[in-house]
Image: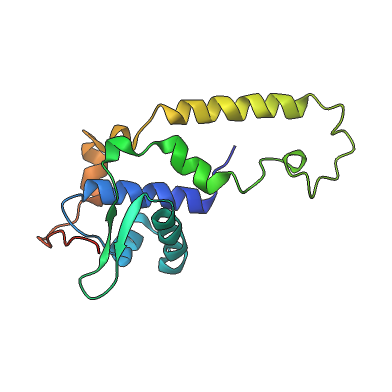
């Protein structure tokens, strides 16, 4: 299994926001720290905001931050938001499936069971589990300076 770049960027963005929870962060800061394109990151930030994981604020003092405590953000929920629109295999895409084995294939059933087990495992992990007491991650992602949190409108 391989996660999409968008999913990977979503998790990096959420971890960056969690590590820097005492301030509003900006896309260019996340992009620099996470080795990402600002344009690609903008799409991810938009989806995270639409799905309620982050709040965004426009303008000179704008940026983004977590919308709820990191203990309430499940990794499984984030992955589902970004991954479920991408079929895992051709046979999972009813509209475009051309596999002649679809009616007799047990491999699809095995894949489905594996995916369910994967998401069940991810449902047991929160953003806090990835960030709290992770000094190495904090060293990489912690921003310096004292730009206070400004409430998102």
Name the residue furthest front: 153
What residue do we see at 77% from left, 39% from top?
91
Number of dots carrying numbers: 0
Locate residue 125: give its quadrant: top left
Q: Residue at 48% x, 48% y: name it.
A: 7
Asked if residue 147 is positioned above or below residue 9 in the image, the reply reads: below
| Residue located farthest toward the bottom when viewing the structure as drawn | 60
Q: Position of residue 150 (x, y in %)?
A: 16, 62
- Using the image, determine if residue 97 lies above or below residue 146: above
Q: Quadrant of residue 133?
A: top left
On screen, residue 43 above or below 140? below
Q: Residue 99: percent from the left, percent from the top? A: 85, 40
* Position of residue 95 measured from the top left corner of the image (x, y, whole percent): 79, 49
* Quarter of the image where one finds residue 78: top left
Q: Residue 134 at what x, y percent from top left?
A: 24, 36
Viewer-proximal residue among 148 and 41: 148
Give the quadrant of the N terminus. Answer: top right
Relative to residue 91, is residue 68 drawn left or right?
Answer: left
């Amino acid at each position: 299994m391989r996660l999409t770049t968008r999913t990977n960027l979503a998790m990096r963005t959420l971890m960056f926001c969690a590590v820097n929870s005492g301030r509003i962060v900006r896309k260019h800061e996340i992009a620099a720290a996470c080795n990402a394109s600002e344009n690609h990151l903008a799409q991810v930030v938009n989806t995270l905001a639409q799905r309620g994981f982050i709040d965004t604020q426009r303008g000179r003092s704008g940026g983004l931050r977590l919308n709820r405590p990191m203990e309430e953000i499940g990794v499984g929920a984030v992955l589902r938001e970004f991954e479920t629109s991408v079929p895992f295999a051709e046979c999972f895409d009813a509209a475009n499936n051309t596999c002649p084995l679809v009616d007799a294939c047990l491999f699809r059933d095995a894949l489905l069971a594996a995916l369910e087990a994967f998401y069940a495992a991810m449902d047991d992990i929160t953003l806090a589990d990835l960030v709290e007491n992770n000094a190495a991650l904090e060293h990489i992602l912690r921003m310096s300076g004292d730009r206070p949190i400004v409430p998102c409108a």
